[in-house]
Structures are given as C-alpha cells and as structure tokens.
Image (cartoon, rainbow, N blue to C red):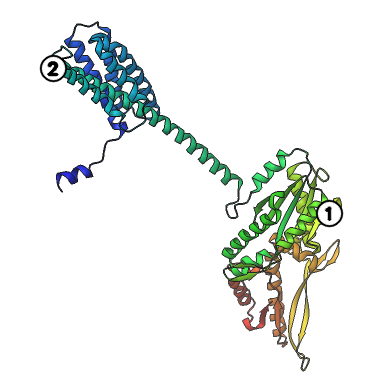
C-alpha cells in the first residue's frame, strides 16, 4: 500500500478529537508571550485556564455535557482574550483579534476555520511591507496567536453547535422511544388495534358521559385453530381487525381484548345507535375471509352495554357487555343488549358449570346408547353413546344445556375422557356377552386440540382389552 493509499485509509479526526488540541496550542502560545514580554501576572492564569480546558478534553472529559461546558468556557475565554491580548501588543492588532474572536464563532460555513490563519498571513504581509515596524520573528509569533485564536474560536462554535444538536437529537430520540413504548403498551401486537389497557383508559377518561360498549366474540373461531393451525387463526384475527376498523370508521375505537374477543367503544351512542353499529359489524364479517388461499367463514356474537344506563364503572361495563354477548351466543341471536335478568341467567350458568366439574366424581353422569341400524335389513351395526346429567336437584339435564358450558370452560376434556372410558368398558362387556357391536363416541373440536388424544384413546382401548375397530369417533 502506497503513501497516498495509507493516508486515504487513515480515519480522519473528528471535531471532538481536534477541539482539545486547539486551546492547548492557544494557551501555550499565550504563556510564551507572557514569558517573553513585560506584562502583568494575571494574563498567565487566563492562558493556563485555556490549556486546562484542552487537557481536560484529551484526558477523557468528553461526555455530551462536558463538551457543552467546555465549549461555553472556551467561548468566554476566547472573548476575554479579545480584550486581554491587544493590551500586550500594539493597538493596530485589535481589529484582527476582534475578527478572529467573533466571526469564526458565529459563522456556520465549513471555511470559517480559515479566518484565523488569513488574519495571521495579513499581519505578516504588513510587517514584510514595512508598514508595521516590528521584527519578523515577533510578527510570526503574533500571527501564530491569531491563527490559534481563530481555530480555537471556530472549534468552540462547532463544538457548541454539535453539542446542542446532539442534545436535541437525544431529546427527540427519547420522545420517540417513549412514544414507541407507549404504543406497545397500549396496542395489540398482532392486529395493531387498541388493547384492553387503552380501552380501560378511554372508559375511565370519559367520566359519566354517555357511551356504548360493544363486545364481540367470533363464533367457532377455535375450530379454525384446531383444524388449520394457529398461523391461520392469527392471520384471520388480523383481517377481522381491519374489517371491524373499516366498519366503525371514525365513529368509535376498536380494540382487541385477547383471543377472538374484540371491543368497540362508541362515545355518545345510545341503544339504537349501538344496535345499528353492531349490525354493521356482523355484516362486515359475512363475506368469507381468504387466508393463504383458504376460504374461512366466521360469524360473531355481539353484546352491548350502555353508560350510564347499565353501569358507570369501566370494569363493570365490560362485565355486563360480556353477559350480553354470552346471551347472544347462547340464544343464537347474534346481538343482545344487556338486561338485568341476563345477570341472573349468567349466574345460574356459572353455578351449573361449577357443579358440572364435580358431576363425574359424584357419578351423576350417565350414558344412553342410541342404536345404529342398517337400512337394508334393519340389522344392528352399532350404538352411539349419548351423555346425560342426572342432577340431584334439577333432575335430568340434556347435553344441549351443559355441553356448551363445558366447551367454553375446558371441562369438555374431562367430560370426554369419562364418556370414552365408560363407553369402551360397556362395549367390551357386550362383546363378552356375544353382542358384537361397535360403539361411537362424540368428540368436541376442543378435544382435537389435545396433543395426546391418540395416546389417550389407545390407552383406554388397551385398558379394557377392546379392539380398535370396535370404536368410532364423530
């Protein structure tokens, strides 16, 4: 590598690296003048302070705050030298010192550094022409002071502006980072919609002003996750969020509360207006979604709660909207506005669910078997196991009452395990009696989400010594 290439490859020093050397040169030069001329002792301290500023920069005192402090001090010392230095030299140099102390400080151009050297060259030219009767050695010394003073002033201005710009960039970066953190804390990562926290803040901010809260839950969304996978489910939720946002527009705020549950906040809306928006939301979801070339049809159940008619507190309003949504889902109506009697029905459903969890251990569940007959010769080819609940107080409860509760809560897996074990044991008993029939057990979509479903079924068949061909699933 040649000399030119090495020079090009060498990193150029930055302003922050050059800045500390300039006041050192300036200060040492001033101390030399003080040593060679008869001057008062106090300028020595001024020049020593300038040298100290440069040494502090070279020794690592180079944080953004330190650069700001050093730039301000250097500007002050430089302006002070504008008054001090002319007292030590002939009065005709005052103009030069005024120029190199002020102009490089305020000029923004990249050539402002040349003011000091130019002033020094002009002074030497005057001495050489004989217009200034001083020895050339003294002229060169004074020209050096002018050059150093101009470079120091220019460096101080550049450093100060750089420090101020860095401080402004830091402030803006902090504001942007705070804004990003705020957005991440108040918005859903998947859909970009407002999350539960932001919804709660908006519910609280309005005081008791009228508003409508719509809670929307996708019907059979779990089937999408169970059959296609969570990747399709996430993509579907993203598209649902966009459609809901387009349907609401500027009339309200759309939020995702988690899973397949969304909320819409309509400020100033009454029951009629909220019902219209709910219908628009459900209509927006009627057209099938396309996820990776797969058509997916979904529907939604919407519950509506109003402030202040139904509740004033945000959490209570969410709870009542959830009660109304559950009523809409259970009744198949699509949309329900909260009514006080719904709370009683919901409380009854919750109590029933709590009792259902213990029904297996209390032997309250029974299986009835519906024959499956071949149409041609009416031969018995199998039996379908149907679960019933003999409640000690409520009497017999049919599956259309407690199965939806079990599916929503996760109790369905415990229920399915009991039905499977009981049906397989009964089928084995029939076969030992010479009744060669198969048994069919219904599975919920939630059951298919179990990773160990196949192993559980195989273990049940092995436990009761039943051939796999004797068991069917629907």
Give the x, y percent position of residue 226.
Answer: 62, 67
Q: Residues within 10 Å of mark 2 (few under 14, many from 20)?
A: few
| Disc number lying in front (2 or 1) | 2
Q: Is 61 rendered above or below residue 264? A: above
Q: Which mark is residue 342?
A: 1
Q: Distance between the residues labelled 2 and 1?
A: 103 Å
Secondary structure of residue under mark 2: helix
What is the quadrant of residue 41 in the picture? top left
Instruction: Decide which of 104, 44 is in the foreground and name it.
Output: 104
Callout 2 touching callout 1 (CB < 8 Å)? no
| Viewport quadrant of the C terminus | bottom right
Q: Is residue 164 left or right of residue 324?
A: left
Q: Nearer the viewer, residue 131 or 163?
A: 131
Q: Which of marks 2 and 1 is nearer the N terminus?
A: 2
| Kind of element beneath mark 1 | helix
- Residue 71: quadrant of the picture: top left
* As drawn, 371 above or below 89: below
Residue 11 marker: none
In the depicted view, which residue is nearer to us: 372 or 24?
A: 24
Q: Position of residue 472 (x, y in %)?
A: 67, 80
Q: Give percent across and percent down for residue 242.
A: 64, 57
Q: Is residue 225 left or right of residue 43?
A: right
Residue linked to disc 2: 137
In the drawing, does residue 30 fall left or right of residue 73? Answer: left
């Amino acid at each position: 590598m040649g000399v030119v290439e090495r020079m090009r490859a060498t990193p150029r020093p930055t302003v922050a690296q050059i800045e500390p050397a300039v006041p050192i040169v300036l200060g040492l030069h001033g101390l030399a003048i003080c040593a060679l001329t008869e001057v008062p002792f106090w300028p020595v301290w001024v020049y020593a302070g300038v040298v100290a500023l440069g040494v502090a920069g070279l020794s690592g005192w180079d944080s953004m705050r330190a650069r700001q402090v050093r730039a301000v001090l250097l500007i002050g010392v430089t302006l002070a030298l504008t008054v001090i230095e002319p007292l030590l030299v002939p009065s005709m140099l005052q103009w030069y010192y005024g120029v190199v102390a002020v102009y490089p400080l305020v000029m923004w151009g990249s050539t402002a550094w040349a003011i000091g050297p130019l002033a020094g060259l002009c002074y030497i030219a005057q001495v050489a022409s004989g217009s200034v009767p001083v020895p050339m050695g003294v002229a060169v010394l004074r020209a050096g002071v002018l050059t150093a003073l101009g470079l120091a002033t220019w460096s101080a201005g550049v450093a100060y502006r750089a420090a101020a710009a860095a401080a402004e960039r830091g402030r803006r970066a902090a504001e942007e980072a705070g804004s990003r953190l705020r957005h991440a804390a108040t918005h859903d990562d998947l859909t970009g919609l407002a999350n539960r926290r932001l919804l709660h803040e908006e519910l609280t901010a309005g005081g008791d002003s009228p508003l409508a809260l719509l809670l929307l839950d996708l019907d059979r969304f779990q089937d999408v996750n169970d059959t296609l996978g969570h990747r399709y489910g996430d993509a579907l939720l993203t598209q649902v969020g966009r459609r809901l946002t387009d349907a609401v527009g500027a009339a309200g705020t759309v939020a995702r509360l988690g899973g397949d549950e969304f909320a819409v906040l309509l400020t100033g809306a009454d029951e009629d207006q909220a019902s219209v928006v709910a219908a628009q939301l459900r209509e927006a979801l009627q057209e099938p979604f396309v996820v990776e070339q797969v058509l997916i049809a979904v529907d939604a159940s919407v519950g509506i709660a109003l402030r202040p008619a139904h509740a004033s507190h945000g959490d209570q309003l969410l709870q009542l909207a959830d009660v109304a949504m559950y009523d809409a889902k259970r009744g198949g109506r699509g949309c329900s506005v909260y009514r006080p009697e719904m709370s009683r029905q919901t409380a009854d459903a919750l109590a029933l669910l709590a009792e259902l969890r213990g029904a297996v251990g209390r032997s309250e569940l029974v299986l009835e078997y519906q024959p499956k007959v071949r149409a041609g010769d009416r031969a018995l080819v199998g039996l379908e196991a149907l679960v019933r609940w003999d409640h000690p107080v409520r009497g017999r409860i049919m599956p259309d009452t407690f199965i939806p509760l079990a599916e929503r809560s996760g109790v369905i897996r415990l229920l399915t395990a009991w039905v499977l074990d009981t049906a397989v044991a009964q089928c084995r008993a029939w076969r030992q009696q010479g009744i060669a029939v198969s048994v069919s057990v219904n599975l919920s979509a939630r059951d298919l989400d179990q990773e160990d479903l196949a192993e559980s079924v195989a273990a049940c068949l092995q436990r009761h010594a039943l051939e796999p061909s004797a068991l069917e699933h629907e």
